[in-house]
Image (tube, helix red, strand yellow):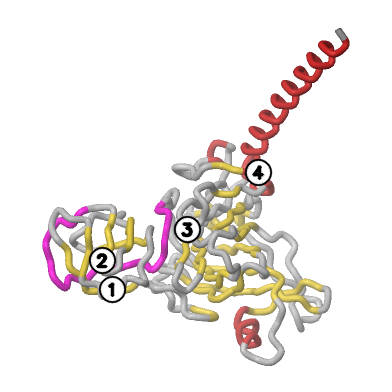
Amino acid sequence: MLESTQMRTARMSWRRLAHLTKWAFACGSLLLFVPRPANAAYAELAGGSGYSGDLSHNLAIRHQQLICDPTSGTGSASVTYDPSMTSLYSIYNTAGYDLSFENVGVMVGTTKEVVSAAQFFAAQGTSTPLTPWGYVQVGWTGPSSASPGTEVVGGTPIQATMVAANTVQGSATISGLGSTTAYFTGEGVTGAQFVAGTVITSVGSNSIVVSNTANATTTGTTLTFSGLAFDGTTGPAGSNTFGLEFNYLPTSNFMPVPYMVYAETTGYPVMGGTGTTSPTDYITDASEPNEEITDIKPAMMAGALPEPSMGLLLLPALAVLASGRGLRVKGRSGRDSVRFGV
């Protein structure tokens, strides 16, 4: 009788344990992992909007790129990254916006301070490089008539390339490219022979296959390749303002690297500037151009080369549930990025 009671108690304990484990796993999944959403409407449902982002990557040169994309107006944004996993490569403007300032966070002893991006990149080529702590702040003005990449600090950012290629009507295969080592699954392809939104789906040794068939047979036609593997989800329409490009440092291509876009509210000491601090972040809205908006929700994301099939939603990103107004950031990150807060 005693043995039967013990066995029954054990069975009940295992059932409870299984139930609790299943519940905990479900809750953990809800908190930590979310599939890529079809659009970025979280903040709208919560009564506001905020920073959001996604990443893109170039596998050949192991770079990640983040593009910021507000609706309109002037403003600034801060981005944090892990300097042990990525290093800042370039800051640049995109079409229709000018950069007003660029700051990079550096360690001065044990103090977090900022310097201009020009100072930072100039020092990196010397025997006394500055030590980054993983912070970039960029301000912009616009809309303007600025062309993309006319303001660049650091290295040359990834640009779209134009290539002569061969297409066959009704076929999704592109040939005549020569070496295909520079092409990636998910990279955008544009040209008169293909509908908008066409991307590379597979790469062969002498040809590539894209997501749509060509509408004409051509030889030596000019096609434009974005140079970035992109997930194709951009959220509501907006205007690109600036881009950040990073060197991806992990040995493995599948290590997710975290980034956060947020509004800095206090600023940091400026290195060498007695008593001065970096500006706080704000944005303006086209409907209220004289009102500075500072209540902007942050967004966090993680990307790899390429990303895993599920995006990692870090807990601070739950701030998107709070009310606020903000800027939409169109970033770019591998193929299954997390976006929220738009």
Instruction: Identify the secondary structure beneath mark 1.
Output: strand
Residue contact at pointers 4 and 3, CB within 8 angstroms: no
Residue contact at pointers 4 and 1, CB within 8 angstroms: no
Query: Gap in Å between the C-alphas at discs 4 and 3?
Result: 22 Å
Disc nearest the viewer among 3 and 1: 3
Query: Gap in Å between the C-alphas at discs 4 and 1?
Result: 41 Å
Which of 263/134 is in front? 134
Residue depicted at x 62% and y 38%? 29
Residue pointed to by mark 2: 207
Instruction: State which quarter of the image contains the N terminus.
Output: top right
Q: Looking at the image, is 236 positioned above or below residue 24? A: below
Q: Looking at the image, is 262 positioned above or below residue 93? A: above
Residue pointed to by mark 3: 334
Mark number displayed over residue 318? 4
Which of 300/282 is in front? 300
* In the image: residue 277, left or right of residue 36: right
Q: Does 31 appear in magenta?
A: no
**N-term-proximal mark, 4 vs 2:** 2
**N-term-proximal mark, 2 vs 1:** 1
**N-term-proximal mark, 4 vs 3:** 4
Name the residue type under label 3.
Gly
Query: Gap in Å between the C-alphas at discs 3 and 2?
Result: 22 Å
Residue 331 location in percent, x, y?
A: 50, 59
Query: Gap in Å between the C-alphas at discs 2 and 1?
Result: 16 Å
Mark number displayed over residue 162? 1
| Quadrant of the rendered image containing residue 95 | bottom left
Q: Is residue 73 visible?
A: no
Magenta residues, as a range? 213-232
Name the residue type under label 4.
Leu
Query: Gap in Å between the C-alphas at discs 4 and 2?
Result: 43 Å
